[in-house]
Amino acid sequence: MIFKRKEFKSRRQLSSIHLIVLFYVLAVCFSSILLSLPFLHKTGVELSLLDTIFTAISAISVTGLTVVSTADTFNTAGKIALTVVLQFGGIGIMTLGTFIYILFGKKIGLRERQLIKIDQNRTTLSGLVKLMLKILQIIIIIELIGTVILSSYLLMYYETWQEALLQGFFAAVSATTNAGFDITGSSLIPFANDYFVQFINMLLLILGAIGFPVLIEVQELLRGKNKLKNGKYHFSLFTKLTTTTFFGLVLFGAVMIYLFEQHAFFANKTWHESLFYSLFQSVTTRNGGLATMDVSEFQDPTLLIISILMFIGASPSSVGGGIRTTTFAIMLLAIYNYAKGNTCIKVFGREIDQEDIMRSFIVIFTAGILCGTAIIFLSATESFSTIAIIFEVTSAFGTTGLSMGITPDLSTVGEVIIMFLMFVGRIGIFSFLFLLRGNDTKDIFHYPTEKIIIG
Amino acid sequence: MIFKRKEFKSRRQLSSIHLIVLFYVLAVCFSSILLSLPFLHKTGVELSLLDTIFTAISAISVTGLTVVSTADTFNTAGKIALTVVLQFGGIGIMTLGTFIYILFGKKIGLRERQLIKIDQNRTTLSGLVKLMLKILQIIIIIELIGTVILSSYLLMYYETWQEALLQGFFAAVSATTNAGFDITGSSLIPFANDYFVQFINMLLLILGAIGFPVLIEVQELLRGKNKLKNGKYHFSLFTKLTTTTFFGLVLFGAVMIYLFEQHAFFANKTWHESLFYSLFQSVTTRNGGLATMDVSEFQDPTLLIISILMFIGASPSSVGGGIRTTTFAIMLLAIYNYAKGNTCIKVFGREIDQEDIMRSFIVIFTAGILCGTAIIFLSATESFSTIAIIFEVTSAFGTTGLSMGITPDLSTVGEVIIMFLMFVGRIGIFSFLFLLRGNDTKDIFHYPTEKIIIG
Ligand SMILES: [K+]
Ligand SMILES: [K+]
């Protein structure tokens, strides 16, 4: 009863998922070829095949883990090429795919709608094309505004306007797509004392990671659409749940980072420095991957908190990865309601669909097993501390891109494991599970149910 | 629909759980007083209050983590007193409670049956008293046979028959109750090359951790009861599932330990040494806590595998803790069936009850959050490596008792956290969640269901 019956059942839908994965694989291949072109590299740079593919997967999955320094490897043309790859990854190959269809004047058929539907997890088919166009529109507007603000401001820092524009443009795209790549050579550390740059970056990171449906609904609210009888705007349960969880996690992260570091990293910092360090490093775990400090300077409990936050990741239908905020929220609500003895999950005047609860459980378990296995294998193949490995694995699966600095020193096996995690983190646990599925078996017969002893 | 409705709903049942916890608390108090009696200590031993309570909780929860050496702290009378505490903990306060009722000639009423029912998770009321008596009978028979075999054999090792008897008796009780305590001062390391002692210990450990229902059914099989029409014995789904998972985990553990250690700890060992080291250390993670080597000599991946195995723990209704084997099995089956697109879990010609699936999920999540929080806090309060802390936390929650040696050096806060985990691990996540529950709220109204985006 609980397991999903209607959705993903037909062979057509099943092959849609295979097709999406195929698109991702093709995007990785295309990006690898693009990023391996010698005239995009700085003179004297030698990029190995494995490192090229790693960079491509990291860019397409907008993770931001790097085995080579972006600043030292790519020239200006290379950096611009990289923003193209980030854009592809961030907005999602499906969105761009739709856009290209429209550009070429093709009418979008049911099959393409299906593809988009599965990739963006929308539960209704209607208005999906419109939605895709809106996504593209919103993201480009955000990036444009971000570029203008950052570039103008960065004129203070750079000698030529060309350099300021490149830095501002790259930073705006990297932040909005939550890519986590940087061309400063040391993330946002050069701006550790510039609260304006940090504020703009946090804003862009949040806009990218909060989820497109939320952005669409906010846009509708601003335009006065979808009003209720009493004149109030009706937000969907999804928007309420994901936004509450998102900002709840940001607040929780900032408070925990502050508490665990107040006598360590923040020992000789002012209150506003501590505030911005805590806040930025918490926001970035939602999926950004940029940092205003070297995270390896944090204490063990802080690093574990950040690992868990990265594992949870961003909102669904955003540029981010991880198990997603809604999944985590449903888990907490399920435990709370079970402990209270309730028979269902009530939240914001609605009940959560039982199938969604089961889906959440499956997602978290599979993600846990996947990350656990990766941690164990990396413990065997690498010589880093357990905490550094846990941090790297959750960062890759959450496509966050923060690192304690071990990425460039990974063994070949280690690089492959991290690549795999970034890939699964991006396509999502659901698509991953459906990839594993063979022929669709139908439940045409049933066995008698027997109760057993639990826990 | 999925959440449990019928069970644990009435106030009477709710207070039954409170009563069980009260019994455990009283047992800890009683044991603390008993173990603090000066004439049970060796001369010159000073045992602090915190260390006494720690030892009492460790003994009542049959965990086996120790802040003081049992061999150096307690004299012969103390060691015998400790076996009494282990017996109390291992068989369960409820079983002994029933036994005492019968000893005093009192008839067992519905209330006591209820208590026993909840403590042992049995789903039928009938025959529970009989069951309790059987449990006691079986455990004492196992311990007696174990004592006779081990004591006779240990005459080889010890000068007097009294010493051999004490060692054999303590070892048999400690192994059967999966207590993990030792009076050799270094677990079973003195018997690292004695395969006979190891074999007997593994047998006793398995008999204690496999679950009482399994033992009862095997006994019925041997006595020719409960036969089907075709003359075959009918094992319950529970027995089939838990036994398969139990031995599956033992095999998996042994293979993984061997693979990760073949070029490390086993580098200069013979094949039979490697076999016994792998097998014993795998069996002991099911709940024993005894070891034939210093586990801190293992590599990181091996330690992580052992941590996960300890977290899973023993079978339900056994002397062990953790999330239990059935819970773990249901999780794996749920993922497998979901990935295959099935609408329910079929296993051994039966379907798993949907409520049981939900229960399993809640148990694992709560356990995960509990252990995760403990690991983060211990990372802040202690100065040990992350791996040592993960190992200690899963060992305490699983009431396994293996340690990388950090237990005696824990801070006061650390000791309290570990005590709490041993307590929750013993009473089980369910009782723990019910303890947190306030007044029973009834679902007298329903909200409309709204679907949201997952993963
Ligand atoms: K990222
Ligand atoms: K134990």
Image (cartoon, coloured by chain):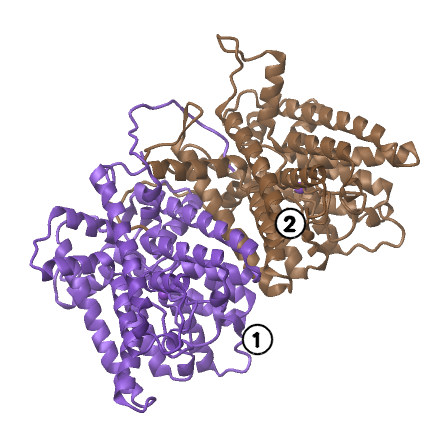
Chain colours: A brown, B purple
What whole-number distance in Å separates the C-alpha atoms at marks 1 and 2?
42 Å
Find residue B275 and report its image quarter. Answer: bottom left
Q: Is mark 2 within 8 Å of ligand 1?
A: no
**How far across and how far down the image is residue B340, in percent?**
42, 45
Name the quadrant where ligand 2 sits.
bottom left
Q: Is residue B306 above or below residue B186?
A: above
Chain bearing mark 1: B
Which residue: 25% across, 66% down?
B87
The answer to whether residue B409 is left or right of residue B196 is right
Q: Left of A55 or right of it: where is B146?
A: left
Q: Which residue is mark 2?
A: A263
Q: Secondary structure at mark 2?
A: loop
Which numbered circle lies on residue B263?
1
Q: Secondary structure at mark 1?
A: loop
- Measuring from the top left, give residue B48's x and y in whole percent: 41, 65
Residue B26 is drawn in which quadrant?
A: bottom left
Location of residue A432 in the rendering, given as x and y in whole percent from the top left corner? 53, 45
Residue B157 or residue A422, whichever sits in front: B157
Disc 1 or disc 2, which is closer to the eye?
2
Crowding near the residue tagged with mark 2, few <14, some 14–19, many ≥20 C-alpha atoms within 10 Å: few
* Relative depth, front residue between B107 and B258: B107
Amino acid on which the number 1 mark rests in the picture? His
* Rendering coords of residue A421 (x, y %): 60, 50
Name the residue nearer the viewer: A346 or A85. A346
